[in-house]
Amino acid sequence: MTRHPDTLAAMRARHGENYRWKLLLAVMVGTIASVMSSTIINVAIPDLSHHFQLGQERAQWVSSGFMAAMTVSMLTTPWLLTRYGYRATYTACMLLLMAGGLVGGFANHYPLVLAARVAEGLAAGVVQPIPAIIILRAFDPSEQGRASGVFGMGVVLAPAVGPSVGGLLVDAFGWRSIFFMVVPLCLLSMWLARRLIPASAPGGVEPNPEGARLDWTGLALATAGTLCLLNGLVELHGGTAWGAALLLGAAVALVTTFVVVQRRTLLARRRHPHQGIDPLMNLSLFRDQRFAMGSVVSFIYGVALFGSTYLLPVYMLLGLGLSASYVGTILLPAGLVLAVCIALVGRLADKQPTHRLVSFGLALLAASFALMVTIKVDQPARVIPLLVTWAILGRIGLGFILPSLNIGAMRGLDRTHIPQGASVINFVRMLGGATGVSLCGIALEWRIAAHGTSLIGPNSPARMAAFDETFLMLAAVCALAMLAALRLKPAHHERSTGH
């Protein structure tokens, strides 16, 4: 480590007034690479299962293994940044992501493909909270919403166009091309990191490799609890009731133990501030009402977003009988509208209260789910226009939520707690996402069984009724999140200063 590292202030002096926007571009490229690697693999799963002669469940682990690794590794970001600094942490993640892409692309054995996906997930998880930390530190409060909007637009475009590009690559070059796709993005992000990302740790201080040790106990408990929860939900979805009860019970026990251990670790750290272990999750953050309510909204928002991402294609394929290529085409306009909406709402986020924007976005999202019941297969001329309209309405809702939620939830935190806050918010949202996919699957199966129908064979009014009721459940989930969103309202003295 050099004696005088490239701190945020030093980099700003070197690159001029617009440095903060160049820095945002640098972290955006790496985040896009990690987001692409998480979503684009889905189009390659059929080819992958055929190549390795796998069942659908085993092939699906390339996606769920990535998600589990990404969810847990988010909690290590604050420790890594403090110990090694922004540039070293970010560059190491890009190297790991690129190595995962190369190993997965060249692998001839499925366990190696799976290991590569887990490595990619670990890298993607550490990277995800970094942009929010940088936005809250490098930008003035009056610019944070706009910066979040610009960043969100770039990141959202990746999953919007990713499946279409991925489908073309798989058709032309096979499933291996999906893994290689992240390599050029990783190389570009590492070049940008060397030029633009500060080498210092959060707060402008030098990284401290001899600092507090990683909370390995907390990490082990969080990992085991997350895996038990995710597998318990999968078991509830398609396994036995006993297996699901055992796994979900273990998840509750592990999470309870995690909370107790984190509280003790925090107290020990306060008694001995210059030695010991930093807690993996600083539970004192939840004393801030806006952060606590923001975390609740993030979890429920994750449930609705990821749940609908799973449910909408299934609905169009098995409910409406549309072809797979048609499904991607129908959802593309909604993805593009979301990208534009995020950029526009980002400017509003600097002027309007967070609770107002988030509540309005959740109301639109709830309405888009509730209005899906107006689509009737016996009125074919109206199916596609209504489907596109309601999908766009929902994405406009997301556009109001995304740029303002993270920033609004963390504005009340002390600056030293921003890295912890960003990692916790992202962790909670991803946990909600994993829960949402299983919840939608379970609710759909339950309603299908209740109506005495199935997802196989010709369409029927009973099957459509089951889908409608599942969409109404998602609408109710969004309405529930609105109760927490209203409590994101800033204190009176912050309202008077416009923050």
Image (cartoon, rainbow, N blue to C red):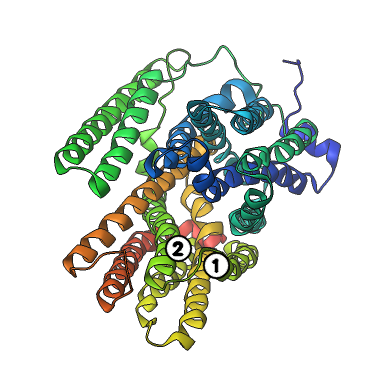
Asked if the residue at tag 1 contacts the one at tag 2, i.e. Cβ–Cβ closer than 8 Å, the answer is yes
| Label drawn at residue 331 | 1
Q: Position of residue 185 (x, y in %)?
A: 72, 41
Label 2 to label 1: alpha-carbon separation: 9 Å
Q: 81 or 315: nearer the eye? A: 315
Q: Is residue 360 above or below residue 430?
A: below
Residue under label 2: 313
Q: Position of residue 471 (x, y in %)?
A: 34, 68
Q: Is residue 375 above or below residue 80?
A: below
Outermost residue to the left: 242
In the picture provided, is 328 more to the left or to the right than 29? left
Residue type for callout 2 = Pro
Q: Earlier in the sequence, mark 2 or mark 1?
A: 2
Residue type for callout 1 = Leu
Identify the element where label 2 is drawn: helix
Residue 319 shows up from this direction: yes
- Residue in the picture at 39% in, 41% down: 55
